[in-house]
Structures are given as structure tokens and as C-alpha cells.
Image (tube, helix red, strand yellow):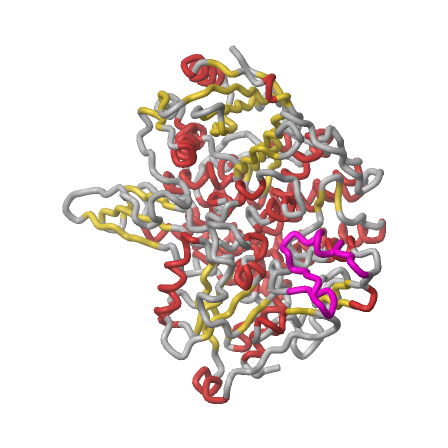
Amino acid sequence: MAFAITSNAIPLPIAAVPVVEVDAFRRDVLTAIAAGGRLLLLIGLPGDGRATRLLAAIADDARGAIAVCSTDVTDAYPALTPDCPSAHYFEREIAEQYGIEPEGHPWLKPVRFPLGGPTIGEADFYSVAGSEIHEVAVGPVHAGVIEPGHFRFNCHGERVIHLEISLGYQHRGVERALRGGPDRRSLYLAETVAGDTTAGHATAYCQLFEGLAERECSARANALRVIALELERIANHIGDLGALAGDVGFLPAASYCGRLRGDVLNLTAELNGSRLGRGWIRPGGIARDIGSDELRELKRRLSDAGRDMRNAVDLLWKSSSVRARFENTGVLRHEAAADLGIVGPAARASGIDRDTRRDLPAALYRARHPTITVGDNGDVFARALQRWREIEHSLGFLADVLDDPGSGTTASAIPSLAPDAVILSLVEGWRGEIVHLAVTDAAGRFAHYKILDPSFRNWFALAFAMRGQPVMDFPLCNKSFNLSYCGHDL
Amino acid sequence: MFKTLLARARQGYRTAGFPAEEPGLPALFRGRPELDPTKCTDGCRQCVDACPTGALRVAEAGVELDIGRCIFCEECVAACPEGAIAFTRDWRVAASRREDLIVTDDNRPRVDALGRELRRLLGRSLRLRQVSAGGCNGCEVEVNALGNVVFDGSRFGIEFVASPRHADGILVTGPVTANMKQALLITYEAVAEPKLVIAAGACAISGGLYRSHPEVSDGIEGLLPVDLYIPGCPPHPITMLDGLLRLLGRL
């Protein structure tokens, strides 16, 4: 098989990536996946002349390796999706961005409705026919303070037969704007890919930048980035546990968790000035070191917050009314999660034992990582419990990191980037695996930049989890995934 | 039930003392910037060149910083060789007029309270419909925080409602993507007169980082009549609360 082998944040010369015939490409990718590999991404790149270059990356999670190969296609090629369901969304994206038809793809619908294409909202939605069948259309403007998206439910009575999720309302041209960089905007664009994942996307961008320059940050800078990432994880998980409590009308836990989320954001703000950690993580390191007094204080306050979190979240597990609403609601079975290539806590709650921090680590996570556990049932309860376990593991892990934050300079200058190279940078954000990919030109600038927020893979899992559910359970199911619209729409 | 009550006692009373007390912002908080154009040297454009959003320009009277475009990143502070720019911890950056967001020295943006008749109509409540039009969920999460027990906007009658029909106005976040423009305008139309429009965050005010992208409208300027601008990327919940309370004449 023709693959170039690399790993997280290790660049490859673009010339080292094999370009094979499309039949060989299909065969190799499918063979690698049948052998236990995972489709990390499948994207289009501008090719020579009229051709579009398809690039596939297959993760070997057991070995921590990423295999990359490519092919050139024009107009059409035989789709991978019928043999590899996790390719379905990537192939929709390729069809939308390059006008290439993956033949045999079951649903080549728009992903983001970019300029020049079909008008958003005028899509050809699936519909189910029959007596007592009705449709419910929700969005783009929703009831809460939340980003826009359109949800189309086909229901029989209260029961959802099929949910179609149509996004793209937040499309603002992030990837296009990153091309030609790095420049003064690049880091900040990365931070706003998904504003609630500022540390996650900023780290993915910086790791990519440093990888292309073949520079590593000091142990100290890496430890501080880990603090930023894990605080972001804790804040979002505890906030979502509160929101889940709110969605089943259990207000005590909703109030306490909402306050605790803010407490963690305030800790972040004390370390860098911004509650979301804007401008904290930078290429070459981190904006600001933390003194030993601050580290001790941070540890003490995290420990206090952890106690309050345990107290608040315990209420969820011990209230039969909450459990009755969480249990067996929105089940995402293990096989479906595996087939669809779901990532993050949503995948782990369905028993998929995968976490970038352990399987494909970069920087500090190579030396140590939090305990990784998985659930089994794949329901709202499992996803809630998974979030809580990850909070506990992150708190324990942070306590260790704060005891030994390493040494070294927190900011180092980055020389120019490798020309004609390709690099993948992976970070386990709080929603799951974030992937940034860049291809550089002869001058070492970004000829192409691709962002994969975990939401890109996981939105379809929400649609799957809703099948057979009462439509009234949608808010609860939705919150248990809490996916990003802007991270998807880019 | 007993455990729930015990937890209530443990979790305590957490609502912030603001506005009666200082908001207790962190030492590193980046609030209202101040400029000292007398320190600028002729022909120097280092801050202008460093700014990721083009918020700075050199005018005849000296350097100007448009906090309607600023993301409060401090790249300009790092770039300035003369120390002419500093971000203070002042959270009061909201303004009624777009031009008041241009900082030239230590000038402060001002919020004019709504007219007496409008305040009478609103009574003690302000119900807003939030519309995210390309917002990255940075502003949205901070707007959500306004409803938690700490900032607790409902103390002042400030709440976010599910329908524009129930709202006194809209609070917009994001640079207004082409794909959300129509939905935003329809939502605005659906609010009964008289109605307010609030632009929260650099994106909604000016397009922010996404300004000039063909995929966006550079914020709501020119699309809707704006009553309150709340700068930031994202604005701190205290900044939002401060702006809203001033608009309501409560501060």
C-alpha cells in the first residue's frame, strides 16, 4: 500500500505523499480501514490544472501513526461512502467545495451553502410520506441564546422517524482567510473557529505552526497550555451538566453548575485576562508565565471548585426524576458511533476507547495524560456521566501538572515555516478531536488550510440518536452533544 | 429532597454585588484602552501594522483606536515602542453612538438613557431576543452568563426570551453572515414597535475579525438602527450588564 507515515504535528514534504490512481487510492484506504484504521480526514485540495487532489489520512490509534495518501480526480470518482460510512460527510464537503461528484454517494446535499451555490434554507429536505406523518421545522433562529441551524423532523405522532440537520448559517470564510498566512490575523481566526474552544483551536494552530518550523515549546509552555486546555474542558463540561439539568427542569443543579462554570472561566481570566483564554496561547509558547504563588492558589481554588462540583453533580445522579429523563434517552449505539467515526466524549460514552491525548499525543500529553475511561450505554445519561468523569480526571491531572509545571522559557521565536510541506495537528478539545491541516507553498506560506472541528463528525450522530425518540427530547439530546455550529460552518 | 436542601446551604449565595459594588474583575482584565498621542513619533505605524482587525489608524490629530473593531488582544501595546497605548481595567465601554467608540486619548464612551416614554413603556422589564448571525459562540456564551445566578440579569428585569414576539428588542452577535442575513431581518421585523437593537461584540458592531469577508455583512451597521454598542471579543458579562443598565437609566 502506498502511504506516507507521519504523526501528530510532524510535517511531511508534500512530494513524499504518494499520488496514486483513484482505484488504488480507494482500495488502499478501504484496506487500511478494514485493518483497524480510522478515517481521520478526507479532503480536497486544488490539484494540477482541472484536477482536484483528494487527500486521505488514516489514523492508527494503537501505534500513534497517521498514514497519508492522495489521488487526482476530475469531475467524478467512485465514492468511498458506500464502503466506509465515516467518509459520508467528507465527500459531501468535497462535492460542495470542488464540484466533484463522488458517484454512488447516497446523499450529496450541501454542507455549508457557500456563496455562489444554492440558497440556504431552500434545500430539498427528506420527507416521509404516510398518514399521520408530519414535519416539524426548527430554526435557524432557536428559542435559546444559541447559534443558528435548521432542524427538520419527520415524525409519526411524537416519535421522530428521521431528523435532518441543515447547517451553514454561520459560514464566514475562516479557512479561506487562513490561506496565504501566517499573518497577524491567523492566530485570532483560529481562536474564533469555535469561541467556546479557544484554547483547543489555538493550540491546534500553534502546534501546526511550530511543527512546520520544527520547533518545540519548552516543558513549561506546554504545561501552561495543558492548564488552558483542561480548564476549558472543565468549564464546558460543568456548564453542560448544568444545562442538561435545566433541560429536565432540575433547577438546583442548573444554577450551581452555571455558577461553577463561571468560576472556572474566572480562573482562566485571572491567568490571562480573558475568560475564554483569548490571546493566551501563542505560536512559540504562551503569552504569560504563572508564578509559583499563582500555581498554588490555582490548585487550591480548583480543589474547592471540585468539591462544589461534586456536591452539585451528585444531585443529578441521586435524583430519580433526573435519571428517569436521562436514562435510555437518545441512545447512540457503539456500532453506529464506530461506523460514523464519532469522536470525543460522545464517542467514549458509546464505548469507543479513543482519546487524542493518549492515542495521538503531541507536546506535554506525550509524557503524561489524564486517566481515560469510557462508558457503554450511549444514552444521555452515559454522555452526562462521561462529562463528569472527564471533569474528575482533568481535575486530578491538573493537580499533578500544577505540582510539576516543568521549566523553560514560555515564549520562543519561531523561524520560517517549512516550504512545500503538509502537516496535521491534532488536539483533544472538550468536544473531541480537533484537526488542523496545512499545506505550505514554496515560500513556506499556507497554500491550503483545513479545519476539522469535532462537530463536523458528530452532528450526524445527534441525528442518529434522535431516531425513534419523542420529538420533545430533542433539546435534551442536543445538549448532551452540545455541538458547535460555527466550528462546523467555518 | 433533604440532600437538595443541604446542597443549597453548601452552595451559598453567589450573586455579584455589581452594580452596588465594584465588579471584581481580574488584575489582567483588558478594558477601555487609553491612548497618549503625544508619545507618538512621526511616521510610526507599528500599532496600525500589528492590529489584526484594522482597528487603529493614524489620523491628522494622531492615532485613533476604534473599539468597535478592537478585539482587545493588546498586539498594539506590544508593538508600540513608546508606550502610547494601554488597556485599563475599566469595564465601561458600551456606547449609544458609533462615533463614541473611537478612542483618541482617555475619552470614555457614553450611553444615553432611553427616553422617558420608552422607559415608561418598558416598565421594570427588558426582554430581548438574541440573534447569533455568525457569532463564534464567544459572545453567545457570555450573553448566556448574564442569565446565571452570578450576573443574574433578571434582578433588573433583563431576560432573553424565546420569541421575537415576546421581545422588546434584539441583541445581535456575529458579523452577519450572508446565510443569516435574511433570518436576522425577519426576526427584527417580528419584534413589535417600539423596539431596540443592541450590537454585542466586535463582529456585530463592525465585522470584527471577519470584516471585508465576502461571506459577511460587516456587522449590523447599515442594516438595522443600533441603540447600543457593546464592544469586546467577547464583551465581559459585566460590560454588557453595565451597558444595558445605563440604557435603561438605572446607572
B112 or A226, which is in the foreground? B112
Displayed quadrant of residue B65: bottom right
- Residue plotted at (36% across, 50% down): A150
In the image: residue A484, left or right of residue B76? left
A29 or A247, which is in the foreground? A29
In the image: residue B36, left or right of residue A457? right
**Magenta stretch containing residue B55, yes or no?**
yes
Q: Can residue A253 be seen in this view?
A: no
Q: Look at the picture and state if A284 lies above or below A195.
A: above
Q: Look at the picture and state if B103 lies above or below B81.
A: below
Pinpoint residue A68: horizontal percent, then vertical percent: 55, 21
Boundaries of the magenta span = B42-66
A486 or A387, which is in the foreground? A486
Pinpoint residue A307: horizontal percent, then vertical percent: 67, 53
Pinpoint residue A76: horizontal percent, then vertical percent: 35, 24
Pinpoint residue A178: horizontal percent, then vertical percent: 58, 41
Q: Can residue A124 be seen in this view?
A: yes
